[in-house]
Image (tube, rainbow, N blue to C red):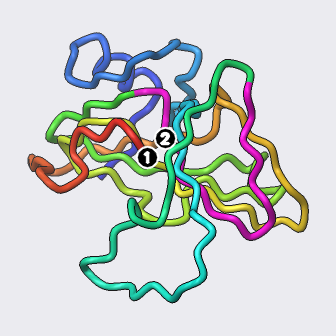
Amino acid sequence: MAVLSHDEIIKLLDSGELKIAPLNRQQIGPGSIDLRLGSVFRVFKKINKIVTVDDFTDYMDLTDEIKLKKDQKLLIQPGELVHGITLEKISLPDNISARIDGRSRFARIGLLTHVSSGFMQPGTVGKIVLEMANLSPIALSIKPNTKICQIVLDELKGRAKYAGKFINQSKP
């Protein structure tokens, strides 16, 4: 696998093989693409019970959806986990996978932008759900449209296509 450069990313976008919308070309760096935070979040309900973690555990039962209005911010308390989603919808071709990386500017203040599942299968279509955690001792305020993470594109040897549970997701 090889990481795609700025010029290779532009070629894929121009050919229509890779789709990212909305996208400003200034979001494309030398070897990655910055993605912005959307306005829909899932926050954990305040419940006092033990949740069994297994193949049937559903985060939807444990969280509530919040949609921020323009200029609203979401406060993430120390130790809190919230689900966000990217503003951009991505459609990967079947010979390209992607890795989601946080941005060091946010990690340095204790914000993890994706706790797990940092890999996008080839052929994935949809927005990226972000499992964001505040590891700092202070509350952090986040707002939509912030460049929250980046993806690095890798070219596969061969072709494959994702057809799993989270294809075409549009909400966290």
Between 111 and 56, the residue placed more toward the observer is 56
Q: Which residue is mark 1?
A: 172
Q: Quick check: 112 above or below 54?
A: above
How busy is the neighbourhood of tag 2: few (under 14 within 10 Å), some, or many (20 plus)?
many
Q: Position of residue 52 (x, y in %)?
A: 40, 88
Q: Is residue 143 left or right of residue 114?
A: right
Residue at 25 percent of width and 41 percent of height: 96
Q: Magenta stretch containing residue 92, yes or no?
A: no
Between 77 and 121, the residue placed more toward the observer is 77
Q: Which residue is mark 2?
A: 85
**Total marks in image:** 2
Residue at 29 percent of width and 22 percent of height: 19
Give the residue type at disc 1.
Pro
Give the residue type at disc 2.
Ile
In the drawing, what numbered circle is on residue 126? none
Q: Is residue 129 left or right of residue 126?
A: right
Residue at 36 percent of width and 23 percent of height: 20
Tell me which corner region of the image, top left, top right, bottom left or bottom right, holds residue 132: bottom right
Q: Position of residue 56 (x, y in %)?
A: 25, 77
Q: Earlier in the sequence, mark 2 or mark 1?
A: 2
Q: Magenta stretch containing residue 77, yes or no?
A: yes
How busy is the neighbourhood of tag 1: few (under 14 within 10 Å), some, or many (20 plus)?
many
Tell me which corner region of the image, top left, top right, bottom left or bottom right, holds residue 170: top left
Q: Is residue 86 left or right of residue 53?
A: right
Q: Is residue 34 visible?
A: no
Q: CA distance from mark 2 to mark 1?
A: 5 Å
Q: Position of residue 11 (x, y in %)?
A: 31, 17
Contact, CB < 8 Å: mark 2 with mark 1? yes
Residue at 63 percent of width and 39 percent of height: 148
Overall secondary structure of the magenta stretch? strand
The range drawn in magenta is 72-88
